Amino acid sequence: MRPLVATIDLAAIRHNYAFSQRCAPGRYAFAVVKANAYGHGVREVVEALAAQADGFAVACLEEALVVREVNASARILLLEGCFEASEYQLAAQLGLDVVVQDAAQAEALLACALTAPLRVWLKLDSGMHRLGFSPEQLREAHERLQGAPQVAELNLLSHFACADERGHPLTEQQVEVFLDLLDLDFAQRSLANSAAILCIPAAHMDWLRPGIMLYGATPFADLSVAELGLQAAMSLTAQIIGVHEVPAGDTVGYGASWTAPRDSRIATVSCGYADGYPRHAPSGTPVLIAGQRAPLVGRVSMDMLSVDVTDLPQAQLGDAVELWGAQLPVDEVAQACGTIGYELLSKVTARVPRRYRQS
């Protein structure tokens, strides 16, 4: 078997969910498990949180179907709503909470004869300008949907654009726009994503939506997982499968983009961009071998990458290589690659086996 594995610590995910609730006592929380639980395995994460989570949030019906197969009774929030009128009937059969984010979705819902009414979340565009009603449009939608036979419960939801940038003026503006609609009759409200859960108490409302924090990555550029009190959930571990002596002046990898500045010892590692490691990772990106850091050199290949182990004379064939995990935060690797932890975690591909630890 190819020596590459993503080890998922389910106890860490349970810890991080509990931490989100401690940030906002008395609130409920939808654990966000879209995108295969950010690459961690949606079935396993939902099972791990079954006795703990108040509900789960997904992006689409396909994801909702998987969650419902695993958990027959949990509340499931469909974040992007329904794209066709026929999907409302399936949402009703599955007992979903459904976001309605524009007039077309609202009219399609009102045109349906459902087997059971839905819990509806009207999405407010409070300033991100991606999806959602304007405040004026939302008031109209509220009037149309309040008391409709298709609606069991009418709720309010919005999403932050810059909560990960602490002190950004748009965040306060978005909170104010949200609060300005609370003269309307809503059963429940939700505004706080991971960053807001951790740092914006005014946004906590009735339901939280912890996402990236569940998986032990930080939403902030200036606050680490350790500083926040979260625990890393995924460790991506490969192995040294080759070691070569490279004379000074010789090059390594495709495109000959890295030239050895000295006589060097180069280790080949069993992970590449087809596994989800970023192809654009620059030379110098750290990996961890026996607790010591070594820099990536040259271009990342489809199935392999190269590491300079000249200063780790003990490194040898068969040694484990942590690409990110408990000792090397995914956020640090992401920063070196000019991206974010969300992308690295969610892009770990299906050919990488997941192994699960309960504690």
Image (cartoon, rainbow, N blue to C red):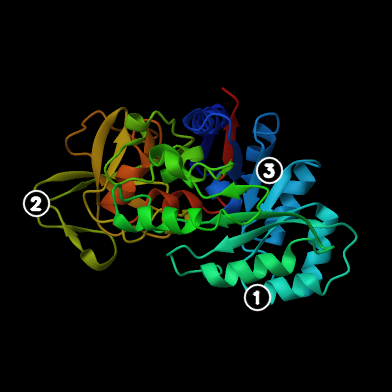
Q: Residue at x 56, y 22 (%)?
A: 359
Counting residues from the start of the chain, the first of labels 1 and 3 encountered is 3
Q: Residue at x 23, y 39 (%)?
A: 309
Q: Residues within 10 Å of mark 3 (few under 14, many from 20)?
A: some
Is 238 drawn above or below residue 91 in the view shown?
Answer: above
Find disc 3 in the rendering and name its residue.
Answer: 43
Instruction: Name the image quarter holding residue 312.
Output: top left
Towards the viewer: 8 or 134: 134
Secondary element at tag 2: loop
Residue 131 appears in the rendering:
no
Q: Nearer the viewer, mark 1 or mark 3?
A: 1
Q: Amino acid at mark 2?
A: Pro
Counting residues from the start of the chain, the first of labels 1 and 2 encountered is 1
Find residue 355 and report its horizontal and vertical position in percent.
58, 35
Residue 103's tag is 1
Q: Indicate left or right for 278 with 311 as reference.
A: right
Towards the viewer: 106 or 30: 106
Find disc 2 in the rendering and name its residue.
Answer: 261
Find residue 18 and report its horizontal and vertical position in percent.
54, 28
